[in-house]
Amino acid sequence: MNLLGAYNPGSSLLHRLDAGVRVIVFSLFAASILLLDGYGFIISLAMLLLLYRASGVPILPQLRSIGRFRAFFITVFLMNAFFQPSSDSFFSWWIITFSWRGIAMGLRMVISVILMVVLSSLLTAVATPVSIADGLRTVLHPLSFIGIPVDQAAMIVSAAISFIPVLASESESILLACRSRGAVPEGKNSIARARSLVPLVLPVFLAAFRRADELSLAMEARGYRGEKGRTRRKGMHVGKAEIIMLLSGGLMLSLSIIVKGVL
Amino acid sequence: MLSITADDVSFSYGMEDVLSHVSFSIIGPGKTVILGANGSGKSTLMKLIDGLYPLRRGRIEVNGLSVSDSNAIPAIRASVGIVFQDPDSQFVSPVLEEDTAFGPENLGLDREEVERRVSRSLELTGLSAFRLRVPQTLSGGEKERAQLSGVLALSPEVLIFDEAFSMLDSISRREVMGIVNPMRKDHLLVFITHDAEEAVDADTVIIMDKGRIIASENPRDTLSRSDLLRSASIRPPFAVRMRDALKKRGIDVGSPLTMEELEAALWN
Amino acid sequence: MELRLENASIQRGSFRIPPVSLSIDPGLSILMGRSGSGKTTLLMMLSSLIPLCEGRLLADGKELQGHSRRIAVIFQHPERQLFASTVFSDVSSGLSGLGLDRDEIRKRTEAALVQAGIDRRKWTCSPFSLSGGERRRAAIAGALIAEPDAVLMDEPDVGLDDASRSFLSGLVASLRDRGCAVLMTTHGCDDAEDADRVMIMEKGRIVQDGTPDEVLSFTDEAVLSTRLGLGRIVRFEELADRIAERMRGME
């Protein structure tokens, strides 16, 4: 229940932030993570631990759910380790090049992705999809003047976020049902198991479409006819809490720029 | 004026007609029950009434507005509230008060009015204490009430319940009905169901079978006709079944619809 | 098969079932309760599909480590789990991995499809070309094709049309004859009057457990019979007989 997309109610500073400010703050932290690749990731990790602590959202379940996707991360790592062209390699044959550089790149990529996922999970844990959409809308509003459909894009993002836990639980039930019919071989043969999961994509897709269909019908029945004309939340409100977080975000970003320059 | 009228409505999803030449007239306020088995077309009819599906054959008017008139659709949607069967696919937000606000926000009302309506709806459904809760984590009965709050926030004059309480146990059902029943005095309530017991206290019962209306009268003239109900794959109310069983055994107890009427007819 | 939970507990998300010891014998057992009472979770504990937090699950006295195919689970809306390209291959997939030869698989699949009342011509079509009721019957046939000794069904009668309803009762009857342990969760009381055992759950615990006569106090039949002073009668026809008797006696 602590996957990306699951809202975790609370009353911490992060929960109470203005929607628009929160989007900006998280963007600052995200930029810091991207800049702090390499050994700087220790700083990013410390920052994340601090943020989780401050919000009251438990971090261990997030790490555990990332652990469930280790096959994905291992693949990303291997793809980098073995396919990164480098002059200084252990051995190279055809397109395969195994080198320190490749290993380093692989590790950096995997770590960056993991840290970003952990940060995003925190955002979806402290903010409902509606408030993330509101925040995006407020912050990106200027772009609408040059023709970019900001409102609709924000709504799509928030709908997508809210569907992640729904699809996760549907997939879980479909997988359980198929396992009970013996359609998924047990045991350690991962390749056979992976192959047997392929036909399950269809029922999961159907479940997704069915849910989307029901939800859109319900939204229409409740009067939704697009983003135009909808009551908007009040504009950005910047109080003490917002200033604290904006300063923290700014500080973090400056720190990461410095560290990047130094290393 | 509270009314829903249909005139020679037919509808199909593909090859076969799901609704054939359906005509009826419901005048409110009051409680109407549309009774039909799965596949009788009752849910489709409801979706046509709210303009959710396009109507090509026949006419439907809600409070005098035609569902085929696209300019009238927003007004129709604002005056018709639908409570669906599966609450889990209805919530648009993981915070109850945000979800309840969805309807009024769509109407473009100003912020204070939206807040007022949210508070009032949550009070009506007894969920004020659950404002900040995640609707999906509520119990079955509470979820239905949460859905109801979202719908009531639109201040609709017509309320349609599409098999809304079929998943609930009897205690939760009684709780929700306790909130809904009093509304029949000044709203038009339409219950769509396959459970004949729910139709016993209705003002009008409309029975549907395979896309057609086969009866449309008061409860006593419809629900006591067990042959009619069975031909539409509907199980008659308990009191009616018992009356039939006793008649087979040579005992005549008249025409009771409820347990109380049945009891009164026995031992007398 | 006798399925037994010994001091088993589970925690799924925020939902917890405290340690429970329970034994399901051959015959029909019904599990009733409000939504959120834990019926489905208890059913999953008996399924051997998910690990228990504490305690153990035994089948005929032997502890089960992981999933056993002798226990079949039929989830809500089984028709949503169809995934193969033809009706035939979907139903026969239940027989994979059992070491049967192809002829045997084909014979059993054909028999199952015939019993489910699905027209021969549709067997090589996509599962999605079947009607709703046919799809559900095919899904159930597929789940039961390996002839399990225990069948756990989660609200199997929700949203069923008439043909499928009679298929389901016929199925349950033949499973009982075969000596299977069948456990069904349900909201309503319809099937409960013929069951061997009825359990009622509330907030994760079993609060009532006994025969239909002992447990069902809130059905229309039970309420009426009690109010008429006839004691508690749970079966409809029996109640009608007794009332008729009384009325005739009073004339």
Image (tube, coloured by chain):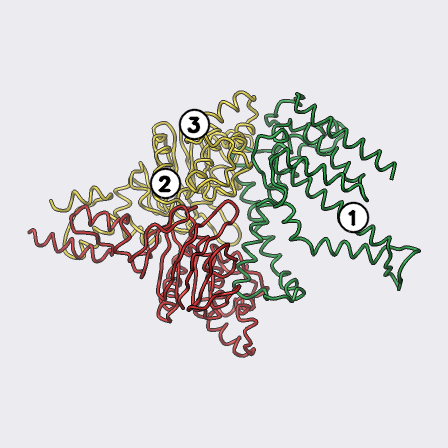
Is A147 displayed left or right of B244 in the figure?
A: right
Q: Position of residue B194 (x, y in %)?
A: 37, 48
Chain C rendering hue? red
Indicate which disc residue B123 carries.
3
Q: Which residue is mark 2?
A: B173
Q: Amino acid at mark 1?
A: Met
In primary-sequence order, the first of circles 2 and 3 is 3
- Residue in front for this viewpoint, A125 or A221: A125
Instruction: Tell me the green chain.
Output: A
Q: Which residue is mark 1?
A: A109
Q: Is residue B36 above or below residue B218?
A: below
Q: Residue at x 46, y 73 (%)?
A: C111
- Which chain is indicated by disc 2? B
- Residue in front for this viewpoint, B120 or A30: A30
Q: Residue at x 57, y 33 (%)?
A: A10
Q: Position of residue A163 (x, y in %)?
A: 60, 44
* Disc 2 secondary structure class: helix
Q: Which mark lies nearer to you, 2 or 1?
A: 1
Q: Position of residue A253 (x, y in %)?
A: 78, 32
Instruction: Tell me the yellow chain.
Output: B
Q: Amino acid at mark 2?
A: Arg
Q: Residue at x 37, y 70 (%)?
A: C179
